[in-house]
Amino acid sequence: MSVDARPRLLAIGGLIAMASAIGIGRFIYTPILPPMAEGLHLTKGAAGLIASANFLGYLAGAVAAASPRLQGNPRAWLLVALAVSAATTAAMAWPDGMSAFLALRFIGGVASAYVLVLASSLVLERLAASGHGGLSAVHFSGVGTGIAVSALMTWGLAVAQLGWRAMWIGGGALSLAGLAAVAALVPGRDAVRPAAASAATGPGDARLRRLTIAYGLFGFGYVITVTFIVVIVRGSPQAAPIEPAFWLVLGLAAIPSVALWVAAARRFGAMQAFAAAAIVEAAGVFASVAWPTITGLLVACALLGATFMGLTALGLIAARDLAPGNPRRWVAILTSAFGLGQIVGPIVAGYGFDLTGSFFLPSMAAVAALVVSAVLVSRAQ
């Protein structure tokens, strides 16, 4: 293997890790939800609770994985987390009761957060150290890749009339294959050492607090549509016949999004890029309920896919810029705020639908959250 090939293979390993645990393990629930809810007679409120259990696990896992107390070999932790993600995804095919679903999605959420934190640490730090930091966009494109792959898989299984349980098993099998690839492509490193903490400056603290609130609002603002977009598509007589295409478009739009938004951040600043992306995403969320035609829903999926991973990366970039002495602490704080927004969003949307028969009001709350997020960040310059 040539020296020049190693960073590229490492970036591809990161892509596969993110695709397996996040794009598939975390987000495959969206295309599986409609047939699963139909088969089990789940209310939208119950569906929202299952989604929120996964996001609660993600919050717990992100805080634990980012803790300086985490000891041991990070590669070993990464591979274990990928295995747990694959196992809990496949296991969703067997139970019928809410308790089991909630437990499995919570554990899967913990595993996906560990993969995000540890894979990013193993991959991004090495790419930066080797002078190949630009390949970080390949790593983050794994989420969109996983979403696109899961869209094609669930589409094929639906055509074959194999049902929602087969979709969960298929997702677990894909994630297990991803584990084998990551084991081959991502080498280990020395045990994790606690990072030395240092306080951010006073002015930085004020801007970081605004960014934290904005990041939490973004978590709430994007997750309602990401969780229920396929359900929304099923409610449109025009769009329902080509339902799987919409989730595929969202995934394909997400693949280049991080590279594009990071390029915008280099030119205009991470905060300005974040504010612009939040407004674009708000337009996508609005289109999903205000323009429920094939064109409108395709626009909604494209705009959402083009922004949600970009916003995730931009928030973390901004935190690292504002707190260079202690980025890990603020990354954990932002991730916690984001996680709280994700937990609340599906519950509000699910029970909001049960009360009103529509996702319109919850989606308008999401639009408002994204607009406020943009305003907060633009004033934090």
Image (cartoon, grey):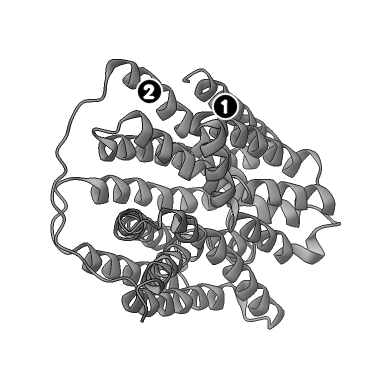
Image disc number at residue 209: 2
Bin the neighbour count of mark 1 within 10 Å (Cα to Cα): few under 14, some 14-19, many 20 and up.
many
Along the viewing direction, whichever of 217 and 122 lies nearer the viewer:
122
How far apart are labels 1 and 2 at the CA level?
14 Å
Q: x, y (%) of residue 321?
A: 37, 33
Q: Which residue corresponds to the image point at 63% horizontal and 68% vertical from the top-left?
A: 151
For residue 7, above or below residue 185: above
365 to the left or right of 114: right
Check residue 268 in the rendering and tell me which mark sits there, or answer none.
none
Q: Which residue is mark 1?
A: 374
Relative horizontal placement of residue 218, taking residue 9 as reference (left or right): right
Residue toward you, 99 or 54: 54
In the image, what residue type sits under mark 1? Ala
Within-10-Å neighbours for mark 2: few <14, some 14–19, many 20+: some
Numbered disc 1: secondary structure: helix
Q: Nearer the viewer, residue 56 or 205?
A: 205
Q: Is residue 348 visible?
A: no
* Residue at image point 33% right, 72% down: 83
